[in-house]
Image (spheres, grey):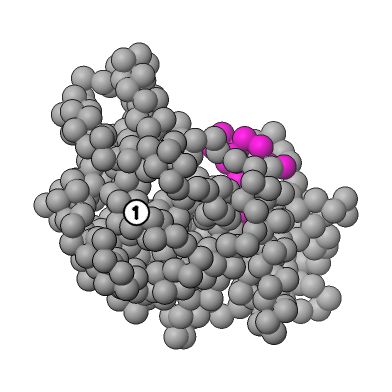
């Protein structure tokens, strides 16, 4: 911990926070980055900040990531200011003396954001009001950026939600078998192959230009929303590293994958894993009314498909990481990524069976038949 405190001290100085550091606490959620809640004396008052060291194995171009973040936070902040709303409803990042919103190091890069007061994160919840509120937050996020030209943003992780490409890469790695693990996963590979035709449907709609890209968050887990600590109403969306051009179905789908699973995403007991339709409806009730006016009917029609697609895609990503030696996601034990794969694959199969029911709920909330 002393080494972390020394590092936090040096990073604080870079961002012109030169007062005494009162406390450093590790924020544990998230599979990719290292995050800390830091209290610093600023002009005689204790203020809290979020310090984050970003994994450059995953995010290889910090300049592009932080430029994207600068673009969108500025855009949202200006809209909030114009409407008389608090800027606490948008993240704000500190800058160095050189005007940069990040500090680069050999093993990663650091950024510091202001702590949004009186908020909490909720890692997972069965509370339908919380899930509905998270849906409103992500829907509002998309609506606030619906007039932002997505082509201005860098694609910070190429093919991040290109399901067809993800599957192709997995199959290549299975054939190469760099770690001798492919024989362990023949059943999982067969199940993925069976679901692939539906999983690449969004790719096909993009290819035919029936769907277009807009600004999307691309990591819409509930724990990427800050909630009011007393009312549990959503206040703002956080973790903006993956904001880039994408499909609205990706954002809706990944949120459902996370929020409407009856188990944790690494649950080893697959009998506990299923799609909770009440949670699905709650998120849809929050999300769709917030963003519907900015969407085409086809985008709305693909929302439920997005849930299935994103769930299968994550199973593919977990399995690919397992096959190639567990380099991407943090793992707590040997085989952790394989456990995650099986959980997500089971959930995707349940979504496949319930796609009709999911579409009916979306249709009912959106107010048109399909």
On the question of residue 39 being in view, the answer is no
Front residue of 43/250: it is 250
Residue 300 sits above or below residue 347 on the image: below
Name the spot of residue 339 as percent of width and height, x first.
25, 40
Specify whether residue 62 is painted magenta. yes
Q: Quadrant of residue 303?
A: bottom left
Q: Identify the residue at image location x=39%, y=61%.
A: 297
- The magenta segment: 48-63
In the image: residue 268, left or right of residue 94: left
Front residue of 276/353: it is 353
Name the spot of residue 259 as percent of width and height, x first.
32, 62
Residue 168 sits above or below residue 82 on the image: above
Q: Identify the residue at image location x=36%, y=20%.
A: 173
Q: Quadrant of residue 337?
A: top left
On the question of residue 93 being in view, the answer is yes
Q: Which residue is mark 1?
A: 302
- Residue occupying the far top of the picture: 176
- Pointer 1 local density, CA inside 10 Å: few below 14, some 14–19, many at least 20: many
Specify whether residue 222 is painted magenta. no
In the image: residue 161, left or right of residue 45: left
């Amino acid at each position: 911990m002393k080494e972390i405190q020394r590092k936090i001290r040096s990073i604080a100085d870079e961002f012109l926070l030169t007062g005494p550091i009162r406390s450093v606490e590790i924020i544990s959620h998230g599979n990719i980055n290292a995050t800390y809640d830091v209290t610093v004396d600023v002009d005689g008052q204790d203020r809290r900040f979020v310090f984050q060291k970003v994994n450059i194995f995953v995010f290889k171009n910090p300049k592009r990531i932080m430029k994207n973040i600068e673009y969108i936070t500025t855009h949202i902040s200006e809209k909030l200011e114009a409407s008389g709303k608090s800027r606490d409803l948008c993240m704000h990042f500190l800058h160095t003396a050189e005007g940069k919103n990040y500090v680069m190091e050999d093993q990663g890069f650091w950024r510091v954001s202001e702590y949004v007061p009186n908020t909490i994160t909720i890692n997972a919840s069965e509370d339908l009001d919380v899930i509905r509120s998270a849906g409103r937050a992500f829907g509002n996020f998309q609506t606030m950026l619906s007039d932002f030209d997505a082509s201005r943003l860098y694609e910070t992780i190429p093919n991040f939600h290109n399901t067809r490409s993800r599957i192709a890469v997995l199959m290549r790695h299975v054939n190469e078998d760099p770690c001798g693990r492919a024989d362990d996963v023949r059943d999982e590979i067969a199940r993925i192959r069976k679901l692939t035709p539906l999983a690449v449907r969004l790719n096909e709609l993009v290819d035919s230009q029936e769907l277009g890209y807009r600004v999307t968050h691309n990591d819409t887990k509930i724990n990427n929303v800050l909630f009011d600590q007393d009312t549990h109403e959503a206040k703002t969306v956080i973790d903006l590293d993956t904001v880039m051009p994408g499909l609205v179905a990706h954002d809706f789908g990944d949120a459902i994958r996370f929020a409407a699973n009856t188990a944790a995403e690494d649950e080893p007991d697959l009998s506990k894993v299923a799609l909770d339709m009440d949670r699905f409806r709650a998120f849809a009730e929050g999300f769709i009314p917030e963003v519907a006016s900015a969407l085409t009917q086809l985008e709305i029609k693909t929302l439920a498909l997005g849930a299935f697609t994103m769930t299968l895609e994550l199973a593919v990503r977990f399995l690919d990481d397992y096959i190639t030696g567990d380099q991407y996601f943090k793992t707590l034990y040997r085989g952790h990524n394989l456990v995650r794969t099986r959980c997500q694959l089971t959930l995707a199969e349940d979504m496949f069976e319930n796609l009709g029911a999911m579409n009916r709920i979306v249709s009912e909330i959106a107010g048109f038949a399909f």
